[in-house]
Amino acid sequence: MTDSLPTSVRHSARGAGAPGAPVDRPRAWETRRKFASWRWEALRTTFWLVPTVLVVVAGVLFAVSFEIDWAAYYRHLTLPFWMRTESADAGRQVLIAIAAAVITVIGVVFSITILALTLASQQFGPRMMRNFVRDIGNQVTLGVFVGTFVYSTLALGSIAIGGHRGVFVPHLSIAVAEALLLVDLSVLIYFIHHIAKSIQLPEVIAGIARDLIGEIDAEFAEQKPDENGPASADRGKSVEELLQLLESEGGIVPASESGYLQFVGYAQLVRIATHTDAVIRLTHRPGHFIAAGRPLATVWPREAAPQVAQALAKAHATGPHRTLMQEPVFAVDQLVEIAIRALSPAVNDPFTALTCIDWLSAGLRRISHVTLGKGVYRDRSGHVRLIEPDPSYARTANRAFDKIRQSARGMPVVIIHMVDALTRVMEETTTAEQRLVLARQAEMIVRSAEESVAEPNDLEDIRSRYRNFLAKAALYDPIGRSPAP
């Protein structure tokens, strides 16, 4: 059980206010994204929100143009001569042609696109389809086409409304529909370029890497102490004491449904614990799979467990798949999946694996510069309210290289590239612990090469790169805070 606890908890038995004890800043939980941000991300990863908004915009635009046409019909204003349609029949034919053309383009283009992406997902992995749905360019394209179709249909229905001045023809509405058709043509050209570019393997990999780096910056942004809050000192029981109480006297809160933990509302949980004067220990981090009935959290005192369980149900989200929010490791796994698919005998594309290794090293370099949380959250008064398994640099680095190393046995070009990538990451590390993690990975890579690479010259190249890695590592002092002079 203790393996899942925060590192600072497992290795510290110092009490409250002990000299030299690690300090967890009060209100650090307020820097984490709220539950509403997860709802917005869930809406963003749909193919209906943006098109619905643009359909509403098209309806509003028609209402405005129709009012202007109606005013022109009663001679309250005059439209330019070039905006006039010869007759109601001519206007009707124009709108029918626009609507038919747009709906045909929607069906044909997106059918071909889905087919192309389905074939691409077989190479990149099925999780790439979610990135396509999440792409704002694809959503806007669909919305513009559907909005034009709705607008043309509404304008078509308004023709030939009777009046004492003769047949009503919405001249401005027809002109706007023609203008929207030109917009659709531009969007179609953009969409063809965009989709042809987005399914290229380097673009897919770079897009995942951008998501990884962006999520690292969002999730592990450096926390600043509260200027108006209390001093950052431990209050009440120490973390070690609370863990013992949670283990011996805590009440279990079971998971209500099975699925991947997609989001945790840390701010909401701290407020819940503060309101009930309780301490909550989470069993899982975002990205872990939870089974219904299994422990989701432990609450102390036990009497607060029922109230916390009701509130906890509204402060986390589970689903059938993992997401990037609060889980940068998911992007790491996506890059690793592409790499090991490329290294499979059926594909045999080591250059794709090299590209993935480059971007993985970029992500690890970024993580090396951020401060990972300790998994302990305090309220405004400095009391511990929430404990979770802490994020681990070792876990991220191992997820980035373990599977690729195992798949690259006997491939000198990939092995050399992995050692070089670890060397580049080593140059950006800030702690001795990080360097120990990288050194362990490099040692395993070289040991695997000794067993699987038969060519002596290739093996010597790998050893040479490993010696360079060790030389870079030796430039840092044992404490691991700065390079040695």
Image (spheres, rainbow, N blue to C red):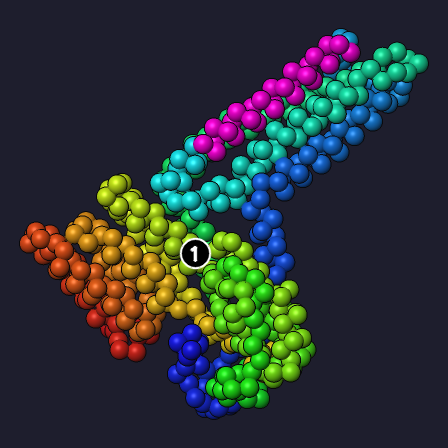
Q: Quadrant of the C terminus?
A: bottom left
Q: Tag count in the figure?
A: 1
What kind of residue is marked 1?
Phe
Q: Secondary structure at mark 1?
A: helix
The quadrant where residue 151 appears: top right
The residue lying toward the viewer, choosing from 113 and 251, is 251
Residue plotted at (37% across, 43% down): 124
**Category of crowding for the residue at label 1, using alpha-carbon neighbours closer than 10 angstroms: few (below 14), some (14–19), many (at least 20):** many
Q: Where is residue 83 shown, x and y percent of the image?
A: 74, 15
Q: Where is residue 372 shown, x and y percent of the image?
A: 44, 69
Q: Quadrant of the N terminus?
A: bottom left
Q: Please identify the dominant SS of the magenta region.
A: helix
Q: Where is residue 300 shown, x and y percent of the image?
A: 58, 82
The quadrant where residue 62 appears: top right
Magenta-colored stretch includes residue 169: no
Can you identify the residue that label 1 sits on? 330
The residue range painted magenta reads 88-115
Q: Is residue 190 visible?
A: no
Residue plotted at (85% across, 22% down): 70
Residue plotted at (69% across, 17% down): 95
Magenta-colored stretch includes residue 105: yes
